[in-house]
């Protein structure tokens, strides 16, 4: 991590979390919100894909389109609030907030304009989703920002560039006028040092490749990469030499048999074969992980790791992951 | 074709799975009807297989693997992928986006044929415009800024265009006999099933008042506008700005003639999907999140009365035979107390594997309890990523085993 980005950190207020599907980006977004909510800070975490992933992680009832307090942060607890952004509600709210349309707003709904805008019209959906996040990030309460930080559980890496760049796309169709103005100011925030995009990955080839592709794309769009977060990291169960031996199928069977006897385990051939197979698979996976880790380290960006949790993630685990994120010193 | 006809007797035993279930957690894995992949791929009545599921579960890999196996057993197959990982795309010869199916090179032992293509949504949309509008009108549409944004950036366009492309492939297959099986991958999001809504959404838009409103200024004098329309146009122009509203209006007017055909085709594709010639496969990995999403897909397909063939559970931890329980292994590791770190590590790994198998079984039981009739097959996890033809073949073998 370079000094320049370190200096950015205190400025980072909008944390956009993306990653390949299945790597656990919602979990990381929730843990990050908790990590940022220490020492009295107030944090908002938003989801945009209607999956109610946050509600199940924080163990609360499904979230409405309203900011709800869902957890208390660690260390003199700050607060985590959560919001599931609904496009139609966001559009009506937006129209009301900026245009005070009143009766005309209802007429728009009757004419199917709201439905059209949120389902058919290009980019409008994404602008509305980001627009709401933008509003929450900029919102003031009693002369200071309403939230110290906002975390966005964003769409997966395959879509993240389009999602975040959509304001530019809109700026392309709406050359003047109010939508253009709104799009421009959102883009200004997204490309400012206040906004960081964090990419979640596992140490497998495809997720790492998508992470590298996403990093290129973010750079092209002028968006800042925060950290690469390696999720579900397993620690090797075997010493380095044994890993090398296991990979080549050269573990010392005699020694294993003797130790099993010592441990009081009846060491028949199938047990030993099973153990050797477990060792070999493990060694192969560790080797793949080392290779993928090297690709990430070559980037020269901050890489943060979170441990593998075998039994899925409950609220208690979320606090532990949050502690790991804080201990990394990157947030 | 011989292989695809073979069905192990154990897979077809009638009567299994009909024992009364007591309570929601009584789902038993032995009661889950097996999904016979070879029978599905060999069934000549089945002409379309749609793979859906949440992101990261291996949908594209599964689609490609099944397409390969079908081609090896004699079907003439085309696989439509949406967004394949780079190396998988290379393995299928999809090095450039050209939006037309190309034969996959370098395959031996094919009794049938295998073509592959990657969806280019902008190109597909452009082609629809060029095929169905007069040259002058097509040019006008393609140059419209609103159209350009719609065809390249809007997330939902991918679902509409996947549907359009499927319709085109099906029409070509019927007309020329070039293919007798189309395998379709779906976009990597929950909205993957949005294509099921496409016809209805399009219809309600086309029949709706909005389109009449947007068309009104282009078609006739403003005095035909009702008062309500006046308010709406006013509001729209306030929000969008006059220039964008004009772009939208020109676009809708130009596309008006085209929309009708688009709707008709999209309705037709919807009917094809509902027909028994189509089989949906829901793909999932054995973790809570992916199986929850799989439930969502299963329920959604049932709601639309779409023909679900079954669940493909990908990357399942392979069962092991060794006669040593997880508890005994952990107790042994404890007793060794660091004397032999290698054996200690191996015992822990063994226990971890058994525990993982147990967790996956209970997740599967939970799914089976909620969806007892959904036929299921599993694909054991491979040690490395799948990005060449040999590993695709291996995946398909595991699915069919």
Image (cartoon, coloured by chain):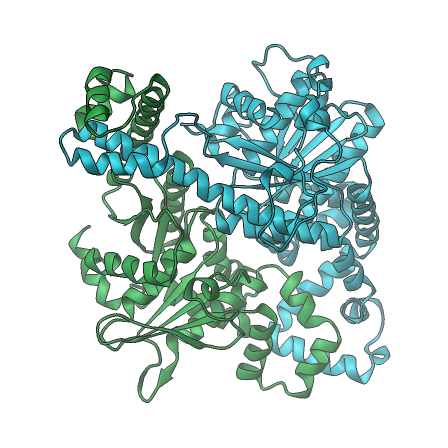
Chain colours: A green, B cyan
Tell whether B326 sits left or right of B389.
left
Q: Residue at x 70, y 19 (%)?
A: B4
Q: Residue at x 64, y 39 (%)?
A: B32
* Relative depth, front residue between A320 and B168: A320
Q: Is residue B112 above or below residue B224?
A: above
Q: Is residue B93 visible?
A: no
Residue furthest to the left in view is: B339
Tell whether A234 sits left or right of A20.
left
* Relative depth, front residue between B239 and B360: B360
* Location of residue B101 by image quarter: top right
Q: Is residue B221 above or below residue A161?
A: below
Q: Is residue A65 visible?
A: yes
Quadrant of the rendering where the N terminus of chain B is positioned: top right
Q: Residue at x 66, y 80 (%)?
A: B235
* Location of residue A275 by image quarter: top left
Q: Is residue B212 above or below residue A321?
A: below
Q: Position of residue A203 (x, y in %)?
A: 34, 39
Quadrant of the rendering where the C terminus of chain B is positioned: top right
Residue furthest to the top in view is: B109
Q: Position of residue B331 (x, y in %)?
A: 26, 38
Q: Position of residue B126 (x, y in %)?
A: 68, 44
Q: Residue at x 74, y 46 (%)?
A: B129
* Relative depth, front residue between B51 and A114: B51
Report the number of discs.
0
Q: Position of residue B357 (x, y in %)?
A: 44, 38
* Relative depth, front residue between A100 and A210: A210
């Amino acid at each position: 991590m370079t000094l320049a980005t370190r200096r950015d950190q205190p400025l980072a207020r909008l944390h956009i979390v993306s990653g390949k599907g299945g790597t656990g980006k919602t979990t990381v977004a929730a843990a990050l919100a908790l990590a940022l909510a220490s020492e009295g800070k107030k944090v908002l975490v938003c989801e945009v894909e209607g999956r109610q992933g946050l509600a199940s992680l924080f163990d609360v009832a499904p979230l409405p389109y309203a900011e709800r307090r869902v957890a208390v942060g660690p260390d003199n607890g700050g607060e985590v609030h959560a919001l599931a952004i609904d496009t139609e509600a966001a559009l009506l709210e937006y129209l009301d907030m900026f245009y005070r349309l009143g009766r005309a707003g209802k007429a728009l709904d009757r004419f199917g304009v709201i439905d059209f805008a949120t389902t058919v019209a290009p980019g409008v959906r994404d602008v509305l989703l980001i627009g709401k996040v933008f509003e929450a990030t900029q919102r003031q309460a009693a002369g200071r920002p309403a939230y110290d930080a906002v975390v966005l559980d964003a769409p997966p890496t395959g879509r993240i560039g389009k999602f975040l760049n959509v304001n530019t796309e809109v700026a392309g169709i709406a050359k003047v006028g109010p939508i253009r103005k709104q799009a421009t100011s959102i883009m200004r925030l997204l490309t400012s040092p206040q906004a960081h995009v964090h990419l979640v990955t596992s140490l497998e080839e495809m997720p790492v490749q998508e992470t590298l592709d996403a990093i290129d794309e973010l750079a092209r769009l002028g968006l800042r990469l925060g950290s690469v977060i390696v999720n579900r990291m397993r620690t090797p169960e075997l010493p380095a030499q044994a890993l090398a031996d296991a990979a080549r199928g050269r573990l010392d069977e005699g020694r294993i048999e003797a130790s099993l006897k010592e441990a009081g385990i009846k060491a028949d051939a199938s047990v030993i074969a099973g153990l050797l197979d477990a060792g070999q698979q493990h060694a192969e996976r560790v080797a793949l992980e080392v290779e993928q880790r090297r690709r990430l380290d070559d980037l020269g960006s901050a890489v943060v790791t979170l441990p593998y949790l075998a039994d899925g993630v409950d609220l208690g685990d979320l606090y532990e992951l949050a502690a790991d994120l804080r201990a990394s010193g990157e947030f | 074709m011989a292989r695809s006809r073979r069905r192990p007797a154990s897979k077809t035993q009638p009567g299994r799975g009909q024992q009364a279930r007591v309570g929601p957690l009584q789902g038993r894995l032995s009661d889950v009807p097996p999904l016979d992949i070879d029978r599905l791929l060999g069934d000549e009545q089945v002409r379309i297989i749609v793979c859906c599921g949440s992101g990261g579960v291996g949908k594209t890999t599964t689609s490609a693997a099944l397409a390969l196996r079908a081609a090896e057993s004699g079907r003439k197959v085309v696989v439509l992928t949406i967004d394949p990982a780079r190396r998988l795309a290379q393995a299928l010869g999809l090095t450039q986006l050209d939006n037309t199916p190309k034969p996959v090179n370098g395959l031996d032992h094919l009794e049938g044929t295998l073509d592959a293509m990657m969806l280019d949504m902008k190109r597909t949309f452009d082609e629809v415009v060029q095929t169905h509008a007069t040259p002058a009108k097509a040019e006008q549409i393609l140059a419209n800024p609103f159209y350009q944004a719609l065809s390249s950036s809007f997330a939902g366009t991918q679902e509409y265009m996947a549907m359009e492309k499927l319709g085109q492939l099906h029409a070509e297959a019927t007309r020329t006999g070039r293919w007798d099986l189309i395998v379709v991958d779906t976009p990597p999001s929950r909205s993957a099933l949005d294509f099921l809504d496409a016809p209805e959404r399009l219809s309600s838009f086309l029949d709706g008042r909005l389109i009449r409103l947007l068309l009104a200024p282009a078609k006739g004098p403003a005095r035909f506008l009702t008062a309500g329309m006046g308010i709406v146009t006013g509001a729209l122009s306030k929000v969008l700005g006059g220039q964008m509203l004009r772009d939208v209006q020109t676009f809708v007017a130009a596309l008006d003639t085209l929309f009708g055909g688009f709707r008709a085709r999209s309705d037709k594709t919807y009917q094809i999907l509902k027909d028994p010639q189509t089989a949906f496969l829901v793909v999932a990995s054995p973790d809570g999140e992916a199986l929850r999403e799989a439930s969502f897909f299963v329920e959604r397909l049932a709601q639309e009365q779409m023909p679900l063939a079954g669940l493909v559970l990908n990357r399942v931890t392979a069962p092991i035979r060794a006669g040593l329980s997880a508890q005994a292994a952990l107790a042994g590791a404890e007793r060794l107390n660091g004397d032999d770190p290698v054996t200690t590590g191996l015992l822990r790994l063994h226990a971890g594997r058994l525990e993982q198998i147990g967790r996956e079984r209970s997740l599967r039981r939970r799914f089976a309890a909620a969806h007892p009739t959904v036929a299921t097959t599993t694909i054991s996890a491979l040690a490395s990523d799948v990005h060449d033809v040999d590993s695709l073949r291996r995946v398909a073998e595991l699915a069919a085993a």
